[in-house]
Image: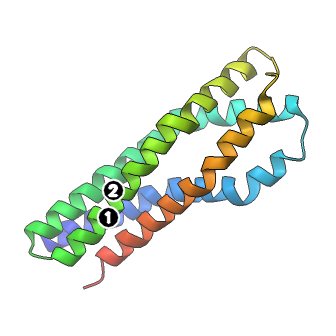
Amino acid sequence: MTLLAQLAAVLAILSTGIVYGTDAFCALVLRSALSRVDDATLTATMGNVHRFADRRMPVPGILGIMAAAAASVLAAVAGHPAESAAAGAAFLLLAVWVLLYLRISAPINRKLTAAADAHEIPANARTLQREWDRIIVPRAVLQGLAVLALGVSLIR
């Protein structure tokens, strides 16, 4: 069971790392870059980014959450409560991330994607982007803490 718990934690790190890296890039680079473009470019760029991200990113996101849960359960079954708790903490952090994404980010993503599809510039394009930007740092922090917790779950 210990090896299975470790393998699940490694899979969770790899999967969560994809989402963490994406959110960290957005927080560190994309926010600033988008502040320097016009509203039409902002809408077209982010609408298309969200179109592909919202289709492709659920795979590593869901895999990371499921693997974190599996790592926690398997470590508990193997009699490693500290490792189980660390992986469990990662699972909870990822669950909070999902809530933030679903309640705040996803609706904005859909609006910007629809505007890009229609070749329209919403009157509130900057406001939408500011609201999205407001949540990207907390999202990146949650993902980073989850990766850290998963790493801690591998320490014996």
**Mark 2 Cα-neighbour bin, 10 Å: few <14, some 14–19, many ≥20:** some
In the image, is residue 134 above or below residue 49?
below
* Front-lying residue, 139 or 69: 139
How far is the residue under mark 2 from the one under mark 1? 5 Å
Looking at numbered disc 1 in the image, what kind of residue is underneath it? Ala
The residue where tag 1 is placed is 89
In the image, is residue 100 above or below residue 110?
below
- Residue 92 is labelled as 2
The percent coordinates of residue 103 (x first, y second) are 49, 35
State if disc 1 and disc 2 touch (CB < 8 Å).
yes
Considering the numbered disc 1 on the image, is that residue within a helix, a strand or a loop?
Answer: helix
Q: Quadrant of the N terminus?
A: bottom left
- Residue drawn 54% across the image and 53% down it: 139
In the image, is residue 128 above or below residue 139?
above
Q: Is residue 35 left or right of residue 85?
A: right
The percent coordinates of residue 130 (x first, y second) are 73, 42
The percent coordinates of residue 28 (x first, y second) are 71, 60
Considering the numbered disc 2 on the image, is that residue within a helix, a strand or a loop?
Answer: helix
Q: Residue furthest top?
A: 118
Q: Is residue 31 left or right of residue 4?
A: right
Q: Is residue 15 left or right of residue 39?
A: left
Q: Is residue 34 left or right of residue 109?
A: right
- Residue drawn 89% across the image and 41% down it: 37
The percent coordinates of residue 155 (x first, y second) are 30, 83
The image quarter containing residue 146 is bottom left
Residue 149 in sight from this viewpoint: yes
